[in-house]
Amino acid sequence: MSLDLGAVYASQVTLNSLTQNLVYASGTVGAILVVVGLLLIDAGTARRKNLFNSTIEKTLGFFIGFATYFMVGFGIWAAQYYIMEGGTMMGAINDWWLGGGLTNALAHETDPAVFPGLNTFQIFVFFLAVFAGIINILLHFSVSERMKASAYYITCVVAAVVSSVLSYATWGSVGPLTNAGFHDFFGVGFVYLFPAGMALVFTLMMKPRPGMMTEHPRVSAYLAPSIGLCAPGLLLIFAGLPMVILSCLFYFDPEALAVSVTMANTSVGISLNNYALVWAGGAISGMLLAYKSGNYAYTLLGPLAGYVAGASGLDVYLPWQSFVLGLLAPLVSFVIYEFTLKRGIDEHKLFPLFLGAGTFGMLFLGIFKAGTPRGGYLGIEEGPYAFQHGEISLVMQVAGVALCVGVGVVTALILATIFKATIGLENSEEDQINGLDEKIWGLKPDVVTHADNN
């Protein structure tokens, strides 16, 4: 294929457009660093006999969701902007599925009248596909070692499609719920609350892991192989997310005016400092809870709780508000974490972090930033998509939380019912005790711990 310089659309490949391309590409790198951080946390906390299998299932689940998103997910999300322009969701999918015309077009050969800024949109497919994979990794934290691989992998495909529909409705600026007033800067609803809703069903339909909640005749305690790996994993996530935040902004003239993905008034510096302070506040509260209770888990849950609570409003908070929110969020996670422990519920990540801190942050935003203008699209001055025509409200925040969690619950109920009637949902207790590494891969741990009495 030769390059015809006479046919190049120069406005598609300007230096300004390259700068935006690099910003969104860096967000993709940041998201991949988050994946590495999550895998390090898993490597530090999964039982030694299931360690490889747990990590490899997360990795493969990530790529299943990633590929599914490339196949059809982005077209679903982008449909909100097609509909804004009088198009249809089917039109968006036709353009942006894996074999679609815009997915496979070269930017410099595409007339800006057909689609301006094509390179940036194509990079955004990669960016959002990473998050489709991350959703599957997060879900696996709640079903790790218990859910059959076949059931999990099927769930990964379904979750990628369903979360794409949720992102269309709740993340952007002109999706149905967003345009009506629901505000979610970072995608807390479809990335965190949705898998937490699925975890509500899957966790409660499966037995706790042997030795996790109570002593077992053959596993006297559930011992993590290297908790120390969690701290580097946590810092990798902290390091990657600022680049992701830059990719949750739209940039307009003059030069690089930053507007949040919801079209709220913001700036790069404020968004990044808000991010820094929800982590710092969460880390401080988590540290105090950890030393007070003697439970190391809060040193890890604290900063993550602060971040998850603040993520939905990093664009609209003032830095001092973010710090206060970061200080408060771990207390919510603490209550839910202790609740699950006392009731023998084998889920200590998604429930306290997402259902707890994530929901708390959504409600905090609806109360303290109510009336903040956002929604619509820059340049539209009247009609249902007028720039900043909508306002943040508590009612819409509640509606968004209910929708995202509820869709997760319904999705998991349907899948679990099908799995139980066909391929089965969970691994046998015997296989979990003996270790899935050996059963599936023929791998044995190099160390046998004193908790393994078999």
Image (spheres, rainbow, N blue to C red):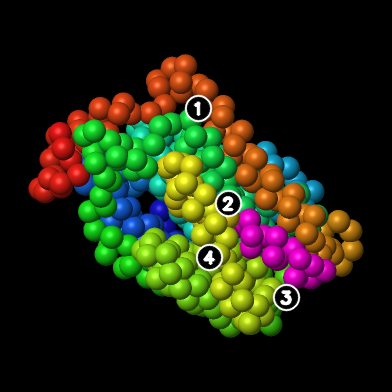
Query: In whole angstroms, how far apart are the C-alphas of marks 3 and 4?
Result: 28 Å
Residue 57 image point, x, y percent? 33, 41
Q: Residues within 10 Å of mark 4 (few under 14, many from 20)?
A: many
Query: In whole angstroms, how far apart are the C-alphas of marks 1 and 3?
Result: 42 Å
| Residue 30 falls left or right of residue 365 | left
Q: Amino acid at mark 3?
A: Asn
Q: Are marks 3 and 4 in contact (CB under 8 Å)?
A: no
Query: In whole angstroms, how far apart are the C-alphas of marks 2 and 4?
Result: 12 Å
Q: Determine whether the residue tagged by mark 4 lies in a helix, strand or loop.
A: helix
Q: Amino acid at mark 4?
A: Pro
Which numbered dot is residue 330? 4
Q: Nearer the viewer, mark 1 or mark 2?
A: 2
Residue under label 2, please give it.
355
Q: Determine whether the residue tagged by mark 2 lies in a helix, strand or loop.
A: helix
Q: Is residue 249 above or below residue 436?
A: below
Which numbered dot is residue 193? none
